Amino acid sequence: MNFNPGDLYGVLPALLLAAGALVLLTSEVFLRPVEPDRRYQAWVAAAFAFAGLWASLAQLGDPAQPLFAGAAVSDGFAHIVAAVVCAALFLSCIVAFSYLESLRATRGEFYALALFSASGMCLLAQATDLVVIFISLEVMSLAVYALCAYLRRGKRPAEAAFKYFILGSFASAIFLYGAAFAFGASGSTRLADLAATVRSGSATTLVYASAALLAAGFAFKVAAVPFHMWVPDVYDGAPAPVTGFMAAGVKAAAFATLVRILVSGYGEGGRWRGLIVALAYLTMLVGNLLAVPQRSVKRMLAYSSIAHAGYLLVAVAAMGTSAPRADAAGALLFYLASYGATVIGAFAVVAIIERKLALSGLGDDLSSWAGLSEKHPALAAAMSLFMISLAGVPPTAGFMAKLTVFRSAIEADLVPLAIFGVITSVAGLYYYLRVVVYVYMVPEAKADAVQGGRLLSAGLAIAGCALIVLWMGVLPGSFAALAQSGAAVFGR
Amino acid sequence: MRALDYLSPYLPVLILLLFAGVLCALIGAAATFLGPKRITAIKETAFECGSPSIGDSHSRHSVKFYLVALLFVVFDVESVFIYPWGSLLRDFQAEGLGWFAYVEMLSFMATLALGLVYVWRKGALEWNP
Amino acid sequence: MAEAVLFYLFAAGVLAGGSQVVLRRNPIYGAVSLVGCFFFLAGIYVLLSAHLIAILQVLVYAGAVMVLFVFVIMLLNLKEEELGELRFTFWKVVGLVAVLATAAVIAWRALGPAYPSTGPARDNAILLAAEGFGGVKAVGRTLYLAAVLPFELTSLLLLVAIVAAVVVAKGKI
């Protein structure tokens, strides 16, 4: 038997989130006939997300220890990722509250599914066993597929969910194939045993075939380039608050697991680095190139999410060398947090605009952003801030994040990759700043204001994201210190 | 002789398969050769519970069948996870792990029981949408 | 020798069934081929002494999951003209070649050296099978004692699947 009740404390954030989901489901089915007003659910979900955030930050100082006989681990890296996921969930719940209210689609399953997926993400960051990784991955993915199809109005959400589901299942199958090879090579599903096999140098080709397949499975989830086909349609079709949560949470969890598998499982030898470097080049190039012609802001943000996966892959590649591994891991965590805050804010603004478009029956096009600065100066300022943060211009979080990632790449002797990253970021300025141009400089064609009323909660979330983005950009010290403390487990 | 060692436990399975196959062939052959055949027009029509069949059988089915089938599969998989537990519980008890196994399965079932309650209260098992 | 013959028999069945699933235009034929594929796969599991998995393969996959597949096919109810022609486009041929080449490279370079056809592995398997490997109790012990976390997570996964199915498929929530 390998169970010790104390192990449950190690997975506390995931437990809290799952408990929140169970509470919401129960209240959804039992309170329904009595209480038709279900607005409380967003706040219950946000409270559980906040509890998860608090728990993961409270555990940050604890020494790293294996849980469930090595099936999972409780360490700083996992806690920071869990904190990012919980913060993303917290903000997304607040955004979703006003979004769903105005579309009259508030139902308990939305928040329950969001909490379930976040619980899967937290466990994914902690898992050190391929079976646990797979099940957590599926808990996360199934919930997110359902969230994409949540609105069920028109064809696009259904198409998005269907595409995501089919391709996601295919990626899971590739992951399982790789896991089978890893098991075949090492006789165990634990990453530690896999690392021992890699160190002993036996069954080399089988080991590297499994590394490639496992990486391919997660390259799909993080939207790296040969596996990026689903991203634009899914980001476009899903409800905007869900898209923001997906971009922040799924990416954080999937990158954490990718790093865990590659560094903890295949760390010695580092022959996977070439693979990741190639993926990073392709992803940065294609993501930025394809974002340029997009007229729909949601699709542009989808391609931008691909491009950012490329920059994150640079950090992963930098972990392929032994020297500054902790620096690169810290850069990765910092980047994940900054990208999460920025993209949730951006999609929250998109949610407000999208709601207006849904009510007026217009398509999502840059022209519907024209003149936003006159009607809603605060919203326009926030959107511009998020755009320049995504572009990586100081004094924003995006700039500091890119700086740390490229610095860690240079320390790891990946100078050409860093230079390529800088060049593609400069190219990315064009399509990010175009949104700012439309918001501020193109005069408005139609004079219909965004409906007020329930904007308040979304506005609060946007303000929170903007604050984080500025804070991480101007005074990155405390965040960088947190990221470094989380990355210390990879210190060597 | 090791090949025999490995596969010899399956000899009864093979005998059973052969027996089943021979029996099927025998019964089929007996029916073909011994039974009389009188084909009439009414026997050639499709038989659907006695009532006359109307329209094309290739009609589109409602999506609620799918939901029921999906829920069936989920609970079917659940039963798969419970079955070995049932056969092992006495062993666990003898090893002093009885309570552990009991609580472990209880939490597993409680989670899924909530799923059942959810499906029930949501009316997903009702026949009318 | 005998088990090698059986293995190649079952493997040929799996491949034939699987390729029929992909190549058949009528989805019902595809579904039935998939049942055949599952049965042959169950045979391979038996050769590996994974008896419980073999039975589950038949009960759950060939039984329950196939019901789901057939339901979907009935729901869609594609007409003959909607099925379209079976065409070999350029990219399909490229994909086929890529898949076959990858499979060949993996078999030749990775699986071949890792699993030599002679060696102690087979004797080991016979000994394990004699100890009840792959039976209900052995699998159960692994499931309930060694894999506590994945086991409990599975209940969460099934619950998420239930909720997701209701959210996506139920007419009126």
Image: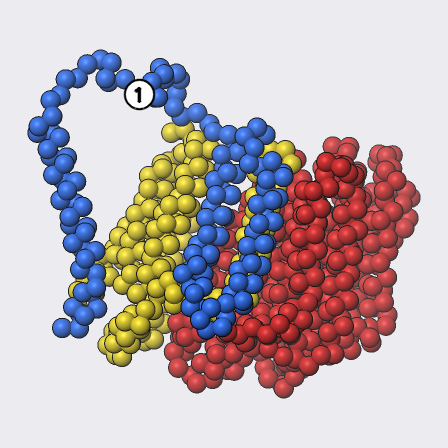
Residue A374: quarter of image: top right
Compared to C62, does C122 lie above or below?
Answer: below
Q: Drawn colour of chain A?
A: red
Q: Image point 37% across, 54% down: which residue? A: C56
Residue C119 locus on image (x, y percent): 25, 79
Compared to C55, does A207 lie above or below?
Answer: below
Q: Is residue C112 visible?
A: no
Q: Image point 40% across, 50% down: which residue? A: C60
Residue A291 locus on image (x, y percent): 67, 53
Residue A237 locus on image (x, y percent): 65, 43
Query: Number of labelled discs?
Result: 1
Which colour assignment does the render follow?
by chain
The residue that label 1 is drawn on is B47
Residue A81: quarter of image: bottom right
Residue A182: quarter of image: bottom left
Q: Image point 68% across, 53% down: which residue? A: A21
- Residue C127 appears left or right of A128: left
In the picture as drawn, the residue positioned furthest to the top comes out as B41
Which chain did the image draw in yellow? C
Residue A80 locus on image (x, y percent): 71, 70
* Mark 1 residue element: loop
Q: Drawn colour of chain B?
A: blue
Q: Chain of mark 1?
A: B
Compared to A409, does A99 lie above or below?
Answer: above
Residue type at mark 1: give it: Phe
The answer to which of A468 and C68 lies nearer the viewer is C68
- Residue A452 appears left or right of B122: right
- Residue A437 appears left or right of C39: right
The answer to which of B121 and A91 lies nearer the viewer is B121
Pick the quarter of the image with the C terminus of chain A: bottom right
Q: Image point 41% across, 38% down: which residue? A: C70
Dot 1 alpha-carbon crowd within 10 angstroms: few under 14, some 14 to 19, many 20 or more: few
